[in-house]
Image (spheres, grey):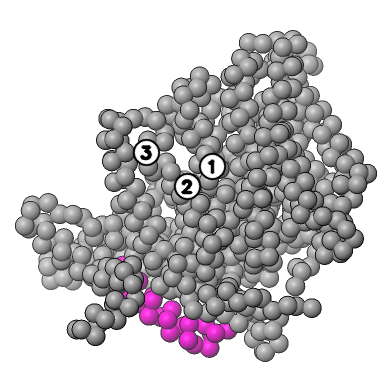
Amino acid sequence: MAALWQRLQKQGGIELLIRVVLLLYPFFPVLDWAVQSLTGQGIRLDRQLVNIFIFGLLALALNLQVGYAGLLQLGIAAFFAIGAMTTGVLTVEKYPFQLGFWGAILVAPVMAGAAGLLLGAPTLRLRGDYLAIVTLGFGEVMRIVLLNLENITDGPRGLNPIAEPWLPVFVKDTIGAEKAIYAFALFALVAAVVLLRLLERSRLGRAFVALREDELAAACMGLDPARIKLLAFAGGAALAGLAGALYATNLTTTAEPNTYDFNYSVMVLCCLIIGGLGSLRGALMGALLLMGFDNVVSPLLTRVLQKAIGGDSNFVMASFSNWRWIIFGAALVLMMRLRPEGLWPSRRIAKELHEPPAEVA
Amino acid sequence: MLDTILQQLIIGLTNGMVFALVALGYTMVYGILEFINFAHGDVFMLTSFLALTLVGLFDLQGASGASLAGGLCLVILTCALFGAGLNYVIDRLVYKPLRKAPKLAPLVSAIGVSFILQNLGLFWGGMPLKVFGGGNQAAAPKAFPDILPAHNLLGAGSGLTLMPKDVLVIGASLVVMAALYGVVRFSKLGKAMRATAQDPAAARLMGIDVDQVIGATFLVGGGLAGFAAVIYSLYINTIHYQMGYQNGLYAFTAAVVGGIGNIPGAVLGGLLLGLVRAYSDQFIGAQWQPAVLFGILILILIFRPSGLLGSTAREKV
C-alpha cells in the first residue's frame, strides 16, 4: 500500500486524480444506486459516462487512423453515423430485419468498415491535405444523404425507437437495461484499449508507425503502403461504427443527421490533439476532458454566470455553451503552437517533436 | 424552359464570381505554402457581418443616388481592408510560427482559427443592433437589406430578370480580378509571388523577402474575401455565422477544380461551380446542393487531383 502511494505521488497530482477517476469508473452505477437509496435522488453520473465511453471509443477509432497511420481524416462522424444508422435499420419496427441489439452490434462495425474500404481504396493514395478534404466532403455528403432520403432514414426525426438490448431475465431483473448499456459501453472501451495496446506492439502496428514516419523508407523495407493504410482506415471506420451502434442504442434513436456534422468530427480530432496523437491514454483523456467540459462544466458555469448577472439573460455571451467553439478552437491553435505532442503523449511522438529534425539534403 | 436555363445562367455566373473571389485567396496561399487555409471562409463570413453593421451605421437602407453610391464604396473599401488586415494578422499570429512544423500543424491550427472566427460571428450577430434584429437571436440568419434598386433591366415584361445587383456583382468582380491579374503578372510584387510559389528556397537566394511575400499574399487574399463578402451579402441578402465554412469549402472546391495554385484556374473553377450549383438547385433540388458540390470535389480529387488547368503536381518530399 505504501509503495503504491509512493508511486502515485511520484506521478504528480493530476496524474493521480486521473488514475483514481479511471479506477472508479466501473463503480459509478453502484455509487449512483447508493446515493439514490440514501437521498432519494440519483446523481445520474452514469448517463454522462456512457456518452464519454462512446466518445472515447470514437476517439480511439480516429486515433487508429490519424495517430497511428498518419491519415488525416476529417469525416469520422460519417462512419459513426453509418454505425448508428445500421443499428436503426436492423432493429426498428419499420424494417423486417429485427435483429435486435446483439445482431446490430455485430453488423454495424462491418458496414462502417466496408464503407471505410470503399472510400479508402481510391483516396488513400492522395496527399495528406487532399485526403483531409475528401474525408470532410464524404462526411458532408453522408449527412446530406441521411437528411434527404427521408423514406429510408426518416430524415430529421431519425429512426426510432430502437429497442433496448435483449438480456437474460435474471440480468435484466437485477441491473436493468440502462445499467447494462453502461456496462457494455465500458466493456467495449476496455476491450478496444486492450486490443489496440496489443496492436501497437504487433507487426501491423509497427507497420502503421513506420508508414507514418516515412512512407518511402517503409515501402523500401518491403511493406505494402496501400494495403496497410487501407487496413488502418477500415479498422478505424469499423471501430467508429461500433461506437455509432452503442450511441444509437443508448439514445434509442439514430438522432438527427445534423448531429453527425463536420463540427462533430472536429470535436473528436480535438480530443486527439489535446490528449496527444498516437497515444491511447491521450485519446481517452481528451474525450474525458472535452465531453466533461461540454456536458458537466459548461452547463454549471452557465448557471453560475446567469446567477451572477441576475436572471435569465438572452444575451448571447451570457451562455457558456456559446463559448465552446472559441475554447475548442483556441485549444487546437495553442496545442499546435505550444505542445504539439499533446498533454499525455506517446513517448515516441514526444521525443520526435523535441529533437531537432535531421537535415535533409 | 429556355428562360429557366438562361435565368440559372445569370444566377450561376453571379454566384460563380463570388466563389471565384474567395477561391483566389485559397489558391494563392496554397500555391506558396501548400496549406489549406481553413479559416479563409470565416474571414469572408466575419467581413459580411461588418458589412451589415456598416450598412446599419450609414443608414444605407433608405439611401439613393450619390449617398448610396458613396456609402457603398465606403463599405466595400472598409470591408476589403478589414478582410485583408484580419487575414494578415491571423497569418502572423498563428501560421507564421508553424512554417517549419509538420504539415498537420498549420492545417489543424487553421481549423481552430476557423472555429474561433465562427464563434466570434455568433457573438457579433448577438450584438444589440437594429440590423441584427436587436441581437436577441444570435444564431439566426440575419437579413441583409436590399439596398440596391430592384428593377428588371430587361424591362418589366421580359421572362428573364437581370437586376442592377447582378450587373454590379459581375462587373465589379471582373474589374477586381483584372486588377489582380495585372498585379500578379506585371508588378514586381507579383513576380516575387510567382517566384516564391515556384521555389521558396531559390526565391530567397535571389534576394526575395519570402516572409514579406507571404504576408502580402494573405493581405491580397483577405482583401478579395472582404470584397466578396460585401458582394455576396448584397446579392444573397442573408448572412449567417456558419456560412463561411460552407462557402469556403465550395470556393476551395472551385480552386481545386481549376487546379490549385493556378490563378486563372480559380476563376474558371469558381464560374463552373457557380453554374453547377445554380443548375443543380433548379433541376435536382436545393436540399441536395452540398452533396452535389462535395461529390464533385471528391470525384475531381480522385480522378484529376491536378484540376482542369493545373499541371500534375507532386508532393514535395
* Residue that carries the numbered disc 1 in the rendered image: B118
**Residue A97 in the image, given as x and y percentages of width and height:** 37, 62
SS label for mark 3: loop
Q: Amino acid at mark 3?
A: Ser
Question: Label 1 to label 2, Cα distance in Å?
Answer: 8 Å
Would you identify the image quadrant in which residue A352 lies? bottom right
Up/down of A74 relative to A144, above or below: below
Q: Chain of mark 2?
A: A
Instruction: Tell me, for residue A3, which label it has, or none.
Output: none
Q: Secondary structure at mark 2?
A: helix
The answer to whether residue B305 is above or below residue B189 is below
Near mark 1 (Cα within 10 A), the count class, few <14, some 14-19 or many ≥20, is many
| Residue that badge 2 annotates | A325
Q: Which residues are magenta?
A: A183-208
Q: Residue at x 80, y 51 (%)?
A: B213
Q: In which image quadrant can residue A218 be found?
A: bottom right
